[in-house]
Amino acid sequence: MDERIITLEEKVAFLEKAVAGMRETVEELNVQMLTVRQELHGLRRAASPVDEEDAHDVEPPPHY
């Protein structure tokens, strides 16, 4: 019986360590995703005309 308990405790310890590692990875990915979203928002804002009047003033590229 003691051997079974030790085996279960070892498995639980392994799983706890694995979950902690996954939690860190998810947190890192979340920070990266927020950074990418902010950069994308900035790019969209920079690429879009400020208002409708500016939209008409934008010249199409030469290949049109």
Image (cartoon, rainbow, N blue to C red):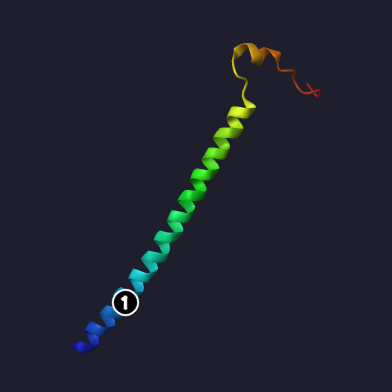
The residue shown at (31%, 80%) is 10
**Residue 41: x, y in percent?**
55, 34
What residue did someone put label 1 on? Answer: 11
Left or right: where 12 falls relative to 51:
left
Secondary structure category for the residue under label 1: helix
Furthest-right residue in view? Answer: 62
Left or right: where 63 falls relative to 7:
right
**Residue 21: x, y in percent?**
42, 65
Furthest-left residue in view? Answer: 1
Q: Is residue 19 above or below residue 54?
A: below
Q: Is residue 57 above or below residue 30?
A: above
Q: Residues within 10 Å of mark 1 (few under 14, many from 20)?
A: few
The residue shown at (81%, 23%) is 62
Left or right: where 2 falls relative to 24:
left
**Which quarter of the rendering shows the N terminus?**
bottom left
Kindly identify the amino acid type of the residue bearing the numbered disc 1: Lys
The residue shown at (53%, 44%) is 35
Considering depth in this image, is 51 or 11 the residue closer to the camera? 51
Which quadrant of the view contains residue 47? top right
The residue shown at (70%, 13%) is 57
Which quadrant of the view contains residue 17? bottom left
**Which quarter of the rendering shows the C terminus?**
top right
**Residue 42: x, y in percent?**
58, 33
**Residue 5: x, y in percent?**
22, 83
Q: Is residue 54 above or below residue 44?
A: above
Q: Is residue 54 above or below residue 25?
A: above
Count of numbered circles in the view: 1
